[in-house]
Image (tube, rainbow, N blue to C red):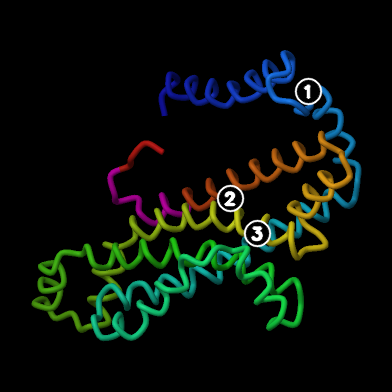
Amino acid sequence: MDSRRRLVRVGSILSVPILWFVASRFGLLAGLPAPVEVVDTYVAELYRDDFWISTIRSTIRVLASFVIAAVIAIPLGLLIGRYTVFADLTFPALEMLRPIPPIAWIPFTILVLPAAELSIMFITFLGAFFPILLNTIQGARGVEVEYSRAAQSLGADSYQTFRHVIYPSALPAIHAGMIVGMGLAWVNLIAAEMVAGGTGLGFLTWSAYTSGSYPTIIVGIITIGILGAASSMLVRMIGHWQVDWATEQPA
């Protein structure tokens, strides 16, 4: 990345606190804490065990749910994308579940799952699962038929064709879905923690709202944003490593 692009990206990040300062300084948004007030609160939160416990638990919940979603969605999406009979048996039911919002799942999971932790992780799992699944399906369906035929003409069996032709060709689409899925996993996690969780950054942010600690709300939002960006960056790094043969596109 050249220096000009780095400068533009740094300017993009710096524009957020600048606009925040202007909005709080001139009262453009009622109740918005000033940046200095939030920084003081953030420093104080760094010395509290509850803040670190919430941060660690939310991070573990997201990463564990995301990995489980990827392990299930990628093979399932490849099979749906390549085999019509399997797609007819599975995809219509999955497509009916996809539009259900995470909040609607919370009462159901509380009833059927034995622990609140499982409810939170299941809802987080759903956020990552469907974007990865749909992108994997599209990636598998987008593989040129000639590639498979060429591999088979060279002696590759069905498994070898699937492993060495279809899966690598679908990887760019899979990783695009994983990036989207990581973002939605955080969205679903925070919603679940606000409603069903006794710990986590979502619960901490909601508790700050109910107690009137508005700077702590911004602390929670900033922390969620930082962790979400770091998680997406990790997925991008893994994607660039696995798809280093593809033409690199600007992020």
**Residue 170 vertical position relative to residue 115 in the rendered view, above or below:** above
**Residue at point 90%, 41% (across, down):** 47
**Residue 145 vertical position relative to residue 10 in the rendered view, above or below:** below
Spot the residue most to the front: 30
- Please state the horizontal and vertical placement of residue 82, each as a whole percent of the image: 25, 76
Q: Give the CA distance from mark 3 to mark 1.
A: 27 Å
The part of the image, by quadrant, that contains residue 42 is top right
Which residue is label 1 attached to? Answer: 34
Neighbours of disc 3 within 10 Å: few (<14), some (14-19), many (20+): many
Of labels 3 and 1, earlier in sequence is: 1
The part of the image, by quadrant, that contains residue 105 is bottom right
- Please state the horizontal and vertical placement of residue 200, each as a whole percent of the image: 77, 56
Q: Quadrant of the C terminus?
A: top left
Label 1 SS: loop
Q: Is residue 213 left or right of residue 87?
A: right
Neighbours of disc 1 within 10 Å: few (<14), some (14-19), many (20+): some
Q: Is residue 41 left or right of residue 10?
A: right
Which disc, if any, is residue 189?
Answer: 3
Q: Look at discs 2 and 3 and give the one toward the viewer.
A: 3
The part of the image, by quadrant, that contains residue 45 is top right
Check residue 244 for magenta coloring: yes
Label 2 SS: helix
**Residue 88 vertical position relative to residue 64 in the rendered view, above or below:** below
**Residue at point 35%, 54% (across, down):** 243
Q: Is residue 110 left or right of residue 40?
A: left
Q: Amino acid at mark 2?
A: Ser
Q: Give the CA distance from mark 1 to mark 2.
A: 28 Å
Which disc, if any, is residue 72?
Answer: none
Q: Look at discs 1 and 2 and give the one toward the viewer.
A: 1
